[in-house]
Amino acid sequence: KQEVTQIPAALSVPEGENLVLNCSFTDSAIYNLQWFRQDPGKGLTSLLLIQSSQREQTSGRLNASLDKSSGRSTLYIAASQPGDSATYLCAASGGSNYKLTFGKGTLLTVNP
Amino acid sequence: NAGVTQTPKFQVLKTGQSMTLQCAQDMNHNSMYWYRQDPGMGLRLIYYSASEGTTDKGEVPNGYNVSRLNKREFSLRLESAAPSQTSVYFCASSEGYGTEAFFGQGTRLTVV
């Protein structure tokens, strides 16, 4: 059974700092890995999708990497802003039905 | 461009009452999903539909039923609500298995 872990559970940084969020998964036979953002009381917003054949994806100040062999993905946020404050979730897609298995998220606070 | 729309946004039920959560997507996606999100448990898959006319159980299907009414709509029914079903329910859709998933804004359900 796939298990997805996100470390740290919470992170507080000053504005302008570059930061890395970590995601690890136990079953390397994934189809893809997706990063989401969730604001309080809101739904999930898709940030980046990395296919299993890819090593990284970039969107603006966000860069996500994938290392299947070690069961790890990282989300790099450059020059963080207060508006980046949210919970970040990673989800691995795999298995016979490509089911998304979610981590419990990292709560990010960027202080002005 | 609405994406995935869920109704209602909030609901309070008494134990034993029934209700249907509605979900519709306007992206012409084949696959649709229902998740629940609970503190400390993360997001867990309840039911999914790979394509119109098919539905399958996810991780936590007990106490729920679903209907894939057409390609756009996927409803979740609670026949006899229990306090353990107090949760935030999210509907999601994707073009197909293993492709990028898009989420609705959620339904916050309280069963008293």
Image: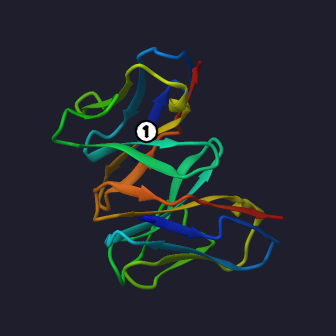
Q: Where is mark 1, residue-wise?
A: A4
| Residue drawn at x 45%, y 14% as measured from the top left | A17
Q: Residue A63 placed where, x, y %?
A: 30, 29
Q: Residues within 10 Å of mark 1 (few under 14, many from 20)?
A: many
| Residue drawn at x 53%, y 50% as measured from the top left | B43
To which quarter of the image does residue B51 belong? bottom left
For this rendering, which residue is in front, A112 or A89?
A112
| Residue drawn at x 77%, y 78% as measured from the top left | B17
| Dot 1 amino acid type | Val
Q: Left or right of A92: which side holds B35?
A: right
Q: Quadrant of the C terminus of chain A?
A: top right
| Residue drawn at x 43%, y 64% as measured from the top left | B3
To which quarter of the image does residue A30 belong? top left
To which quarter of the image does residue B89 belong? bottom right
Q: Left or right of B44: which side holds B88?
A: right
Image mark 1: chain: A
The residue sitting at the left extreme is A53
For this rendering, which residue is in front, A53 or A20?
A20
Q: Residue A99 placed where, x, y %?
A: 37, 56
For this rendering, which residue is in front, A22 or A4?
A22
Q: Secondary structure at mark 1?
A: strand
Compared with B102, A68 (above or below) is above
Compared with A2, A95 (above or below) is below
Question: Which of the colour schemes (rainbow, by chain, secondary structure, one colour) is used?
Answer: rainbow
Total count of labels: 1
Compared with B82, B43 (above or below) is above
Q: Residue B32 placed where, x, y %?
A: 41, 68
Q: Residue B75 placed where, x, y %?
A: 53, 77
